[in-house]
Amino acid sequence: MANMKYSTYRVSLDLQKHQSQVSIAVFQYDTAVRLCISLTDGGNPYTIPIEDGYRAVFYAKRPDNTPLCHNCTIESNSRIIYDFQDSTAAVRGITNCQLRLYGADGGLITAPRFIIVVDERVVTEGLIELDDDELSAIDAIFTKETAREEAEAGRVQAEKARVEAEASRVTAETSRANAEAERVEAETARSATFIALKNEMDYNEQRRIEAETAREEAEAGRVQAEAERGKNCVLKESKSTQTIKSNLDIEGTGKFTSLKIGNQEVISGASVDIKIANYVNTQLGDIADRLDKINNGGGANA
């Protein structure tokens, strides 16, 4: 049967699905049918470790409850080939099938299910002979169907990739939103800290201004008090000087007859050098000048 032309059905079976996954329609007694089966595991391609001694077996129960068991061929770790035998489509109806994959130790790895629907032929085998053109047309139909199934498998795989990319985009967007929320929270905390520091600085500046104002007012009071004190001192000194002067009897020659302080005569009948008289007059003049400055708005120490 190496040179036989087959009608090839390309199907995909998932290891994680337990229900029947594929329905294949054939006619009764068809033998030139080949199933090209690829396996997936949760939608991801499954590689068959044939180097470890794995093997595949086609099991089926026909509509008359008779069993079938045929070996399959594993090609390049990714495909399992099953060619119909004379008994595969011998009974009309629904044939329940399993593709059983065994490990090297003989243990069953998986057994995905599918069905073969065997329809009755319209005409009996041998009554109609098909020429090469008709056979080619039939093969073209099967080839087109196979291409459609492959395109559908590609579409499913592309959709799966799109869903995964969308999930990655959503994850990235969530991370971005979380980072933005953290940034806003940090900015809010920074603003609150800045406002608190500014309020503290404004408060301290206000306290400084108030303290400076109080200091200037105290200084003005002190200056005013110092001026009053100086004025009082000068007035007192002026009164004492006037008393002394009134009690000095100074002659043109620099001599005086007596010196009184209050009502008590301190010196009498003595001669005084003219320098003493000059000194007393100088002191009296200084006191008068200081009093004039105080009265005109100057300080006592001017």
Image: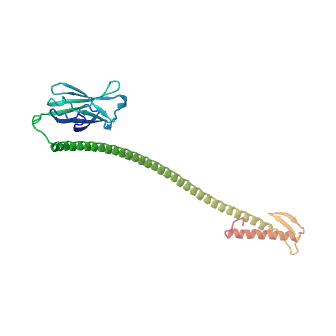
Closest to the observer, 42 or 83: 83
Protein image colouring = rainbow
User: From the viewer's perspective, is residue 22 above or below residue 162?
Assistant: above
Residue 255 in view in this figure? no
Q: Residue at x 18, y 24 (%)?
A: 66
Residue 75 placement, left or right of 9: right
Residue 177 placement, left or right of 29: right
User: From the viewer's perspective, is residue 101 above or below residue 6?
Assistant: above
Q: Residue at x 29, y 32 (%)?
A: 73
Q: Quadrant of the C terminus?
A: bottom right
How many discs mark residues in the rendered view? 0
Q: Position of residue 270 (x, y in %)?
A: 90, 67
| Residue furthest bottom as drawn | 252
Closest to the observer, 257 or 163: 163
Looking at the rendering, which quadrant does residue 69 occupy? top left
Residue 95 placement, left or right of 246: left
Q: Residue at x 57, y 57 (%)?
A: 209
Q: Position of residue 236 (x, y in %)?
A: 73, 63
Looking at the rendering, which quadrant does residue 230 occupy? bottom right
Closest to the observer, 161 or 62: 62
User: From the viewer's perspective, is residue 260 above or below residue 49?
Assistant: below
Residue 255 placement, left or right of 210: right
Residue 216 in view in this figure? yes
Q: Position of residue 31 (x, y in %)?
A: 19, 33
Q: Quadrant of the N terminus?
A: top left
Closest to the observer, 207 or 179: 179
Looking at the rendering, which quadrant does residue 81 occupy? top left
Q: Position of residue 139 (x, y in %)?
A: 19, 42
